[in-house]
Image (cartoon, rainbow, N blue to C red):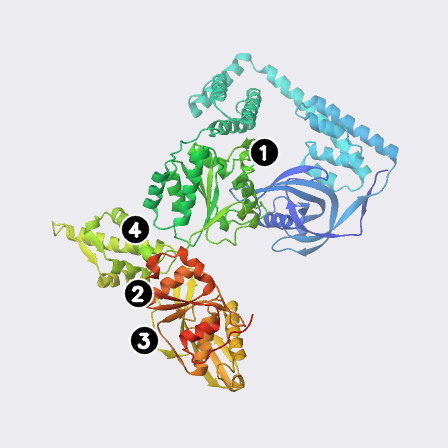
């Protein structure tokens, strides 16, 4: 039994999409081009929820900004199947009508129409009457299809197998060439019997009109003389050829494609696919849009370097020389590259490694990937992933979309013309995701050595082998990379350069490059080591060398201008030695200050060592004792972890009251204020624990702390000194600031093997396992403090 429209009791809240000049019926799939801002936002809102939207026709199609009274209360609830944003801002949408409904009330009209709708369900009708209606509609449509050859066989088959009269009437109303007014009338007929009767009448009328038009066209065509027709067509062809230039014979073009397919070496799957598409192309009109799509697809298959590779240079010594020429330091990344080349020279075939270079900006991650390509005699490809949020950027679009193209991986390989380049995926930590997909998930197949030999681009739709590519990814931070993606990569960390390394880089790389770029000879401008160090310390604060190069470039530009000004007056080439006065003149006053040792020993003032993304720094911690009620105040723009370290240090001091010779109730009589200067700079981390503890004890005991001692280490409530990170940068900061002795956690002794000897010159390292060891060194405690048992 079938049904007549009756409103249901349940309602839904949906976004509203007003339509003009188009009607969406239930059970029909309709493409829409949406250009109005309010309508686009309604579609975006629907995509974020359940993809359902209510579509109703406007009462007057000429209204561009409709109001509530301009929209019909009856319409169709539809589901969004696909949505693509075109370059001009228009939204191309594919929707499927689900069921009729009516608007109960408008909830809001801005920024989008949001309404409450009430669906209509259908009541039972007589089975025999339903069968008669179905036969009548199918018979009418089949007679129309016999006259109109444009009706597809698939549609005819679908219509003939539908056994629901209401659904069948909506499908026919959607596909029959009725006028907009007639379609709107059929949509608003909720009673299936009335709708089917009206539909049959309109189908009869439309079929008669089509038959009459066909007869008229046939009569007119017979009247045209054969010679006149040929003349007209020849003139058209001549005009088209003149507009397009020389048009080669289509058959010759197909023969050229067949020859290219025979010569081109590609996979069996790709070769078979290309031949199938070429056969389709031969059967089509050359000017049809589908023929253009197929031709572009075949060209892509022919242009890809399926098996074309650049030849390796497996000279490990030469590769090491090139890496050292291009980059100073970076020993671990260069060692890993040389290991890969050594293995390749032995086994001849090895899966390309997936390296991930993680480090702060400006340390040379991308330029290192270029050097790897030069050292291995491979082509270099770089793809920036910063801000990429569309999965199709990696996997490509399916060919059904207008303007579809392969993803950036395949595009880059076509451009570089080899199948084994060094492929740098830059800024892999800065990808994001939205309704168009997650590009980081699409990269999982690309960067998995077990899967990327059968990488499937949506546009090509055939497997492509990426296993010979050497992928190198770069990132600033590791925690922003999704775990499944991080699992496929071998992470190599690049720490910031030390001042010693920056001096070498400036002397050997940056100054010669900037002299060349600014038209100077190296003998025309001289930078001493002291001046380079002054620029590093006073005009830059960074882990890399980008700002350092900018400052050197600024000086070179000033010198170049002075040279041009004086060239007309002096014939001899002059030379300039850069000094502090020249720095102040060209770069202005100092932009940064670095920590230096205090002039004398102080009570409650302790020098700590801190790590920042720009390198190591001296961290001064001050404590003062005041009469009060035991309040501990902590200031200096400290993070939560650093505040917790201060609390732990204070609790340790209170637990050692007797052994330190303090009054048992000192914490009830005094307030303690602990401050870390330079409050505008955020500071966090647990490694200042022992520094805070020494500062508090020094203030309580009124004992001075030696100014030449620096320290770093995390403290527990029992007084144990735990290991810290950034040891290399911290020791360098101490050396730079004039600190002669450094207290370090015993557990960090093993990390000395990664620190160059030049950094350790002139510095005494004191290793501490417990806070008592720190107090003996800093406050020269005369009493023997027994350690707490663990």
Taking 689 as reference, is 446 above or below it?
A: above
- Name the residue beneath numbered marker 4: 510
Q: How far apart are marks 3 and 2 (CA)?
A: 22 Å
Residue drawn at (40%, 31%), measured in percent from left and top? Answer: 311
Q: How many marks?
A: 4
* Residue 5 in view (yes/no): yes
In which quadrant is the N terminus drawn? top right
- Name the residue beneath numbered marker 2: 590
Q: Which one is earlier in the sequence, the residue at label 3 or at label 2?
A: 2
- Name the residue beneath numbered marker 3: 599
Q: How far apart are marks 3 and 4 (CA)?
A: 36 Å
Q: Which one is earlier in the sequence, the residue at label 1 or at label 4?
A: 1
Q: Which one is earlier in the sequence, the residue at label 4 or at label 2?
A: 4
Q: Which of marks 1 and 3 is in front?
A: 3
Taking 276 as reference, is 780 above or below it?
A: below
Q: Do the residues labelled 4 and 2 touch (CB within 8 Å)?
A: no
Q: Do the residues labelled 3 and 2 touch (CB within 8 Å)?
A: no
Q: What element carries label 4?
A: helix
Q: What element carries label 1?
A: loop
- Name the residue beneath numbered marker 1: 400
- Left or right for 776, reference 58: left
Residue drawn at (52%, 24%), measured in percent from left and top? Answer: 287
Q: Distance between the residues labelled 1 and 4?
A: 51 Å
Q: Distance between the residues labelled 2 and 1?
A: 61 Å
Q: How far apart are marks 4 and 2 (CA)?
A: 21 Å
Q: Which of marks 4 and 2 is in front?
A: 4
In which quadrant is the C terminus drawn? bottom right
Taking 500 as reference, is 161 above or below it?
A: above
């Amino acid at each position: 039994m079938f049904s007549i429209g009756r409103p249901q009791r349940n309602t839904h809240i949906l976004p509203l999409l007003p339509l003009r000049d188009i009607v969406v019926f239930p059970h029909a799939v309709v493409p829409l081009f949406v250009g109005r801002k309010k309508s686009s936002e309604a579609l975006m809102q629907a995509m974020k929820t359940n993809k359902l939207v209510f579509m109703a026709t406007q009462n007057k199609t000429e209204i561009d900004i409709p109001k509530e009274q301009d929209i019909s209360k009856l319409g169709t609830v539809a589901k969004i199947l696909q949505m693509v944003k075109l370059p001009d801002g228009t939204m191309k949408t594919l929707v499927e009508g689900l069921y009729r409904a009516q608007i109960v009330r408008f909830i809001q009209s801005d920024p989008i129409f949001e309404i409450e709708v009430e669906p209509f369900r259908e009541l039972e009708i007589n089975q025999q009457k339903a069968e008669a209606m179905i036969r009548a509609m199918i018979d009418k449509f089949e007679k129309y299809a016999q006259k109109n050859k444009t009706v597809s066989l698939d549609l005819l088959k679908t219509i003939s197998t539908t056994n629901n009269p209401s659904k069948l009437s909506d499908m026919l109303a959607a596909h029959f060439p009725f006028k907009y007014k007639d379609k709107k009338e059929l949509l608003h007929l909720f009673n299936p019997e009335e709708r089917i009767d009206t539909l049959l009448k309109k189908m009869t009328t439309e079929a008669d009109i089509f038959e009459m038009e066909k007869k008229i066209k046939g009569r007119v065509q017979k009247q045209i003389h054969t010679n006149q027709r040929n003349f007209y067509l020849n003139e058209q062809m001549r005009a088209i050829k003149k507009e397009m230039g020389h048009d080669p014979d289509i058959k010759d073009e197909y023969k050229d494609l067949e020859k290219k397919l025979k010569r081109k070496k590609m996979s069996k799957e790709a070769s078979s696919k290309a031949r199938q598409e070429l056969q389709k192309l031969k059967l089509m009109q050359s000017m049809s849009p589908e023929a253009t799509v197929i031709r572009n697809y075949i060209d892509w298959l022919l242009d890809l370097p399926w098996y074309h590779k650049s030849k390796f240079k497996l000279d490990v010594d030469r590769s090491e020389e090139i890496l050292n020429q291009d980059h100073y330091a970076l020993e671990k990344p260069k060692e890993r590259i040389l290991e890969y080349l050594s293995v390749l020279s032995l086994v001849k075939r090895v899966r390309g490694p997936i390296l991930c270079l993680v480090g702060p900006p400006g340390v040379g991650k991308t330029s290192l990937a270029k050097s790897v390509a030069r050292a291995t005699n491979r082509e270099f490809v770089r793809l920036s992933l910063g801000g990429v949020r569309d999965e199709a950027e990696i996997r490509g679009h399916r060919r059904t979309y207008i303007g579809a193209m392969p993803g950036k991986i395949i595009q880059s390989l076509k451009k570089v013309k080899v199948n084994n380049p060094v492929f740098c995926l830059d800024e892999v930590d800065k990808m994001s995701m939205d309704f168009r997909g997650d590009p980081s998930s699409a990269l999982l197949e690309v960067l998995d050595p077990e899967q990327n030999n059968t990488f499937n681009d949506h546009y090509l739709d055939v497997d492509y082998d990426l296993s010979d590519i050497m992928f190198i990814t770069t990132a600033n931070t590791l925690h922003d990379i999704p775990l499944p993606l991080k699992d496929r990569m071998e992470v190599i960390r690049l720490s910031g350069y030390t001042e010693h390394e920056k001096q070498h880089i400036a002397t050997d790389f940056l100054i010669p490059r900037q002299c060349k770029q600014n038209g100077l000879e190296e003998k025309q401008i001289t930078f001493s080591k002291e001046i380079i160090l002054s620029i590093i310390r006073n005009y830059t604060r960074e882990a890399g060398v980008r700002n350092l190069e900018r400052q050197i470039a600024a000086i070179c530009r000033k010198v170049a201008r002075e040279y041009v000004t004086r060239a007309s007056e002096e014939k001899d080439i002059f030379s300039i030695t850069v000094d502090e006065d020249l720095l102040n003149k060209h770069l202005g006053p100092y932009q940064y200050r670095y920590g230096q040792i205090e002039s004398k020993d102080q009570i409650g003032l302790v020098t700590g060592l801190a790590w920042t993304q720009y390198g190591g720094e001296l961290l001064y911690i001050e404590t003062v004792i005041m009469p009060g009620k035991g309040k501990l105040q902590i200031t200096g723009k400290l993070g939560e972890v650093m505040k917790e370290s201060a609390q732990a240090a204070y609790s340790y001091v209170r637990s050692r009251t007797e052994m330190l010779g303090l009054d048992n109730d000192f914490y009830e009589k005094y307030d303690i204020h602990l401050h870390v200067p330079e409050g505008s700079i955020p500071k966090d981390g647990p490694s200042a624990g022992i520094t805070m503890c020494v500062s508090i004890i020094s203030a309580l005991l009124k004992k001075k702390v030696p100014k030449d001692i620096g320290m770093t280490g995390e403290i527990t409530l029992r007084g144990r000194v735990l290991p810290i990170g950034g040891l290399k940068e911290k020791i360098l900061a101490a050396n730079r600031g004039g600190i002669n002795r450094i207290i370090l956690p015993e557990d960090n002794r093993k990390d000395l093997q990664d620190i160059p000897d030049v950094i350790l010159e002139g510095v005494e390292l004191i290793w501490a396992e417990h806070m008592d060891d720190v107090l003996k060194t800093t406050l020269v405690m005369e009493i023997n403090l027994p350690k707490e048992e663990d």
